Image: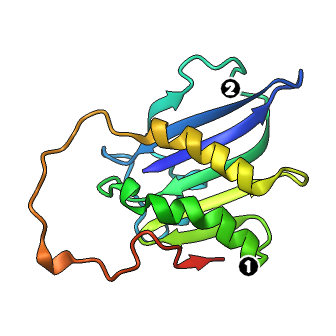
Amino acid sequence: MYLTAQRVRSRAGAEEVHAFLHLHDQLGFPFPTSDPLSVPERNPGRLVRRSPPEPAVPSGGNSVIAYLDIIAEDRLCTTRYQDGIDAVAELAVASGKPLPWVAEVGPVRVIFNANVGVPVVSEYQDLLGAAWPCGRRTKRRPHLPADPSRRSSGSVGRCSAIG
């Protein structure tokens, strides 16, 4: 899964946040488990949803002011890691990390970057707010009983690394 949100600016100066959900659920779109950070550039997957469906700022030829990428295998329920993903910006600012931020939140990779002068914490929150609704699955999977052998190590929901 590759979920991205981008604040774009048209040549005329209009701004809008665009969000896209890509999945790696078909032949020809395998998820690169050994190199998940390659997904945005080399293998974004199959586009399954975009928001807004009819953007006021048409795609193409725009400047990207800021972007947020959330990368995980399709089978993961990324909302389980939402608290940790929500905290990435505040943790990165508190630790003095320069942009771009690359964070591991359990098995989820988060990348954020923004132009100089963009208020990073509020922009991160805005982009995350646009990404989550776009990334929701439309079909609910049947609930499976918990597998005790796959218990969490306790790091779920916490940002384990910001690089």
Q: Residue furthest left?
A: 145
Q: Mark 2 = which residue?
A: 59
Q: Is residue 160 above or below residue 127?
A: below
Amino acid type assigned to the residue bearing label 1 in the image: Ser
Q: Is residue 26 above or below residue 78?
A: above
Which image quadrant: the C terminus? bottom right
Per the rendering, the mark at residue 95 is 1
Q: Please indicate, yes or no, whether residue 10 appears anywhere in the rendered image.
A: yes
Q: Is residue 144 above or below residue 159?
A: above
Residue 75 on image: x %, y %: 29, 55
Tell me if mark 2 has few (under 14), some (14-19) or many (20+) residues whose alpha carbon lies within 10 angstroms of its own.
few
Q: Please indicate, yes or no, whether residue 46 appears anywhere in the rendered image.
A: no
Q: Is residue 33 left or right of residue 91?
A: left
Q: Nearer the viewer, mark 1 or mark 2?
A: 1
Under circle 1, the secondary element is helix
Residue visible at 52% across and 55% down? 70
Residue 89 on image: x %, y %: 67, 63
